[in-house]
Image (tube, helix red, strand yellow):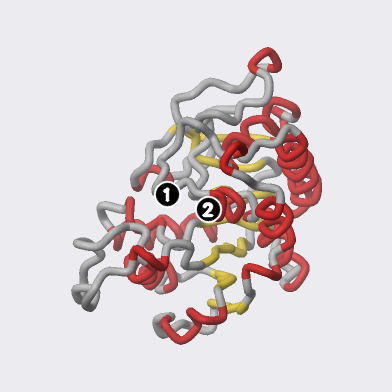
Amino acid sequence: MSVLFVSMLYDLYPHERSVGALPVGQGVGFSQRDIRFRLHHFAQLAACAIDLVLFVDPALVGDLPPLSSRVQVIPLALTEIAQYQRLLSGSSEASLPPHRNVMKDTADYLCLMNSKNELVERASQQFPSFSHYAWIDANIFKVCEEPMTARRQLQRISEQRGGDQIIIPMGQYPAMRPEYGLTTALVWWRFLGGLWICPRALLDLFNQAFAAVIEECAAAGKLTWEVNAYARVEMQHPEWFAGFLAEHNQSMLDIPHAPVVS
């Protein structure tokens, strides 16, 4: 398996920037929405022995840590992300989920989270030689209790034998059912969102199905989390997905050789 990991860095909360420098060797003491907190954790991701594409606000390029030749930086303004712009233009206070973290789950945030698949698609078009494409959150190391072990886990993921399904960490929520309707009001933790790996052969189908769900939500005047849309895609195409139980911690990287839930 050859895996290209894809991530992004954008500052959606400039008002959260704390006064002073980020403590050396730490990522604590600052709001997790502070861009410097996320840059600190991205530096740990970028140090891993993996192939990685980072889409980043051009204004942040100068703030990136030193990077190896395996990390490709693509400056891309938010105005150039089609899904983000389309959803944001139609958003309103009424479209936001009523049960959300008001400080974090803004319209900007939800629209950008729903752009993950577009960015993976862009990366696959620019770097077409990989067998699998993976989304990974830029600050995923914030949930890793043992960073050195996490580095080895990611390297193992990039080297292990790939399958023909979408590998994704799963929470405790059950699969969505048609009678639930369009679930947008609260986050449905069927999937955890920080990581998924898709074989190239499925990528276009996955992206199209995801985009269709997002358009369905938009037509209903609703914004929701990307994990809700992933759960709805799974409901429609369960054969595409193979997952493993995890929590919002380092277990998200502990992919078994054979996923245990499908």
In this figure, which residue is indicated by the disc labeled 2?
109
In this figure, which residue is indicated by the disc labeled 1?
104
Between marks 2 and 1, how big is the CA–CA gap?
7 Å
Q: What type is the residue that disc 2 sits on? A: Tyr
Give whichever of discs 2 and 1 has the lower sequence position. Answer: 1
Q: Residue at x 50, y 49 (%)?
A: 106
Badge 1 element: loop
Q: Report the number of discs.
A: 2
Residue 153 in the image: above or below residue 98: below
Any part of residue 179 in sight: yes
Q: What type is the residue that disc 1 sits on? A: Lys
Q: Residue at x 46, y 86 (%)?
A: 62
Badge 2 element: helix
Residue 256 in the image: above or below residue 141: above
Determine crowd level at label 1: few under 14, some 14-19, many 20+ residues with C-alpha closer than 10 A: some
Q: Residue at x 65, y 47 (%)?
A: 91
Q: Is residue 159 left or right of residue 76?
A: left
Q: Where in the figure is residue 102, as x and y percent of width and height?
A: 42, 43
Any part of residue 155 in sight: no
Q: Is residue 116 left or right of residue 191?
A: right
Residue 5, label in figure:
none
Front in this rendered view, residue 112 or 164: 112
Front in this rendered view, residue 143 or 132: 143
Residue 154 sits in which quadrant?
bottom left
Q: Where in the figure is residue 261, as x and y percent of width and height?
A: 54, 28
Q: Where in the figure is residue 239, as x and y percent of width and height?
A: 72, 30
Q: Mark 2 and mark 1 in contact? Answer it, CB < 8 Å.
A: yes
